[in-house]
Amino acid sequence: MILWILCRTFAGMTTIGTLLIFAAAIVLMVVAIARWKVHPFLAIMGTAILLAVLLGVPYADIPDVIGKGFGGVFSGIALVIILGTLIGSVLEHTDGAVALARAVERVVGKRHPRLAMMLIGWIVSIPVFCDSGFVLVSPIGKSLAHRSNTSPVPLMLALAAGLFASHVFIPPTPGPVAAAGMVGLENNLLLVIGMGIVISLLSLIPAYFFAGYIGGHAKARPYDASSDAIIIEDEHRCSATLAFLPIVLPIVLIALGSVAALVNMPTDVAAVFTFLGKPSIALIIALLSCLPLLMQQKMTGQFYDITQSSLKTAGPIIFITAAGGVLGAVVVASGFVDIIKESGNSLKVLGVVFPFLIAAILKSAQGSSTVAITTTASMMGMFSDSGSMMNALGFTTPLAATLVVMAIGAGAMTVSHANDSYFWVVTGFGGIKAGDGYRTMTLMTLIMGITAIALIALAAALLL
């Protein structure tokens, strides 16, 4: 009780006191998730409520602040997260992801196997979670290495990099699509997709060369050719064209919606294009485009079970994102943003590096890129909200908000190590010796993250 009174008094009297309380609460949240194994939803919600009390939000207002922050996610991006997850699950269960991988391998695989695996990962992880994507298509890389009589490690690292890059940068992957919605870019999703494509591909350039260099020095476990027959069978069972359709279609529709807002055209036509370009509508149509794939695979009877498993996957992401929304609402209601504005000159010097650092700390501490992305985005708030941290730091345009989303994604890949499930998926299924994990996977994600934030900071300096 005495500590609580001191915290309330300290927060009310000094800017430094408020900043210290905020920092201590974030540290407590990270420790609760990483050390005490508290579920991120409970840790973020608990931190939000604790901050509301300690930073002086009136007790009568706290329930309304919680409701506003929590409900905003469900009225905004929850449906997009569900639809994106469901499309990825369909591609996963129908072996559409393997068909995509085989299509890329046929084009570039024989002459440039490392590039093929990197592109395979980059494409597959747009709809499919990187963990699942690696498990699904890593046998292709092993088979390719076996046929070319080379070490599979460079190919596995290239695949891991490609998967990770689109996982943190390109909607409709749940993390970046949630971040886009939370900073107010749900109607500018094409801008986020376009910027995500550019930043992710550029960040893969050093990863490509690093995978070739370090992969030649890392030891691999013996190759098991037993999976080759399965991969060859999958190639004949699934249409790559049908598998590409749910990925390409929503991007085209969102692009048409953006064009309708920029080009003079008949009102009725513009209204239709604008409607089709809404992210939720575009993803609903993309989901419908999965039906021919399900029918080809004779899996329409399993669509219910696929949907059920997808909801179980999307549920935790939505609730963690909603808890992050509560944290963001508390940050605004407590007046913390006003304090940021007071010290804005010092923080503005950091620019996009500020959200990068927050996301990188959260990622390195607790392991989940999605949690790091959604938590950081919730703290930043809407770029159009005059009371948000985005506004306090000068990020007040769609382009600036997009660069913030990219910076958050870069932080969320810095770095993957032993507390990250993807680290163990890559080393385990990739045939990489566990002892080599830190000097391969961890170092590669560090290089990718630093490269990405350098590019984003340069873009911010030139464009903002």
Image: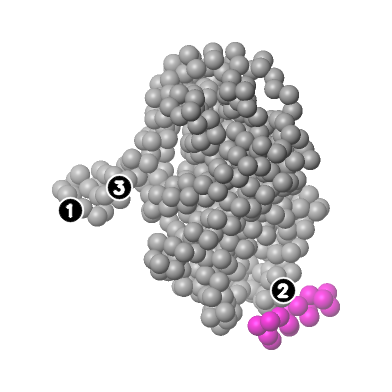
Please state which amino acid type lies under the numbered disc 2: Ile
**Between disc 1 and disc 3, whose residue precedes?**
3
Above or below, comparing residue 198 to residue 63 in the picture: above
Q: Which residues are magenta?
A: 1-17
Viewer-nearest residue: 169 or 326? 169
Alpha carbon of mark 1 to alpha carbon of mark 3: how far? 13 Å
Residue at x 52% of width, y 65% of height: 352
Residue extending furthest toward the left: 266
Residue at x 73% of width, y 60% of height: 29
* Residue picked out by circle 1: 264
Spot occupied by residue 162 in the image (x, y as percentages of width and height): 54, 40
Magenta portion: prevailing SS class: helix
Spot occupied by residue 144 in the image (x, y as percentages of width and height): 57, 24
Residue at x 70% of width, y 39% of height: 217
Residue at x 45% of width, y 58% of height: 402
Viewer-nearest residue: 353 or 384? 353
Give the position of the C terminus as an image quadrant: bottom left
Give the position of the N terminus as an image quadrant: bottom right
Residue 331, can we see it?
A: yes
- Image position of 263 (left or right of 229): left
Residue extending furthest toward the right: 2
**Between disc 3 and disc 2, whose residue precedes?**
2
- Image position of 298 (left or right of 245): right
Alpha carbon of mark 2 to alpha carbon of mark 1: how far? 52 Å
Alpha carbon of mark 3 to alpha carbon of mark 2: how far? 44 Å
**Between disc 2 and disc 1, whose residue precedes?**
2
* Residue picked out by circle 2: 21
Q: Is residue 329 magenta?
A: no
* Residue picked out by circle 3: 257
Spot occupied by residue 114 in the image (x, y as percentages of width and height): 55, 34
Residue 196, can we see it?
A: no
